[in-house]
Amino acid sequence: MNKKIGIGIVGCGIIAKRHIQSCLLLSEMCEIKAVSDLSLEKAEECAALAGEGTAVYTDYREMVKRDDIQVISLCTPPFFHKEPAIAAFEHGKHVLCEKPLAPSLQDCDEMIAAAKANNCKLATVFQLRFIHDIQKIKRILSSDLMGPIVYAQMSGNYWRGSKYYEVPWRGNFKSECGGVTMNHSIHTLDLFLWLMDTPLASVQAEMETLNHDIEVEDLSMAMFRFENGAVAQASCSLNTVKEGHTMSFSSNNHYVSYPYSVHAVKQSEQGGAALDADEVAKMEALAAAVVPELDLPKPNHADSYYDLFQAILQNKEPLVSGAEGRKTIEAITGIYKSATLGERVRFPITPDDPWYTAEGILANVKKSVRGG
């Protein structure tokens, strides 16, 4: 690359610092040109981290006009992604958007359409897709060896105390746009749906607020059905003292899980499960063929940046494109709708559905009385 890609960061909260660290790790490819935040103090703090010469703005609309910026990174709260993204696209900038892509399918579709209309790339930050073990699982699940998934399950386990919700925009649907499902376990859900790699058919879900004085949910549990006939359980919790992502996938005879492990069985004479060591060896051989594209310190978002840069240079879609980010928002919208109405919800969620818009979700979604 002869010329470095110029980066402008909108939003200078905690997550912006991770973006800055990632850009610095990729300093041969990119350079942070400017940062923007309503708070001049926060913007100046991030500019100091980004390096000498980083410009400071309190109005992102001025920053996106710069000719030396090619990528806008959105590190703003969930409710404020669409407006700066569309402004960036209208000035010919590519966008890397923090999760969740947007609070509603309507907002997602408007962002995706604006990117396409201006010949720009839209990428969503789901950095866990690039973990080496996840790539190994993806290779196994995509192989003929694994076969069709019959049953799968996932848990996105987090813990947050009361101080976390002292940030004013957190804890309510209007600004946080959801609770644990939308803003924490969304990472696990994204991985899970991507690894399943088949369209959703329906969801039956429940959600509650058990342990926090907030309006949004701190627990959700869902049963998904997929168009290929697979069934899966998904749980999202903000009350799990030991945090972590877990998921597993079973076909008729093969099993793979995260944290990474593989297993295979054959039928015993009594009809039970007996270890099939030969098949396990084949699965391990598939996984061993996966070589990580980057070997950078974690945690960071460098993989997401690198993927977007390659998409720009090769004029292809990013691995985690806007369309990919939308899939996870549709699943979460289905969970909220099902848990509110107490009934199974079928996909897709169409534009004539009240749950397609942010206003419709806000007007209808089940809210906790604890946060009232």
Image (cartoon, grey):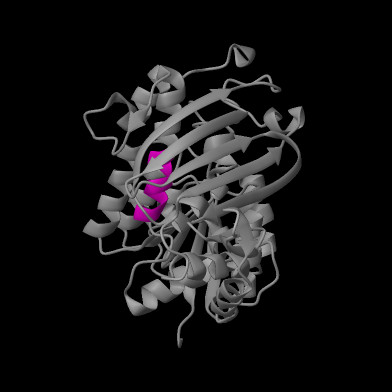
Any part of residue 347 in sight: yes
Residue at x-position 59% and y-position 59%: 269
Nearer to us in this view, 313 or 9: 313
Q: Is residue 371 left or right of residue 328?
A: right
Is residue 223 found left or right of 154 in the rendered image? Answer: left
Residue occupying the point 54% across, 36% down: 181
Residue 143 is situated, as x and y percent measured from the top left of the image, at: 44, 70
Residue 333 versus residue 59 in the image, above or below: above
Instruction: Name the magenta segment's main secondary structure.
Output: helix
- Place of residue 116 in the rendered image (x, y in percent of width and height, measured from the top left): 25, 58
> How many callouts does the rendering have?
0
Would you say residue 277 sits in the magenta stretch?
Answer: no
x then y, percent, for residue 82: 38, 43
> In this picture, is 301 found above or below 226?
below
Identity of the residue furthest to the front in this view: 269
Q: In the rendered image, is residue 53 in sight?
A: no
Q: Quadrant of residue 2?
A: bottom left
Q: In the rendered structure, does residue 325 fall within the stretch colored magenta?
A: yes
Residue depicted at 44% across the width and 39% down the height: 224
Q: Nearer the viewer, residue 346 or 26?
A: 346
Residue 255, position as x, y percentages in the image: 57, 59
* Image vertical order of residue 122 relative to residue 226, above or below: below
* Residue closest to the eye, 200 or 27: 200
Above or below 349: residue 171 = above
Q: In the image, which residues are magenta?
A: 323-331
Where, quadrant-wise, is the C terminus in this rendering? Answer: top right
Residue occupying image coordinates x 39% and y 21%: 343
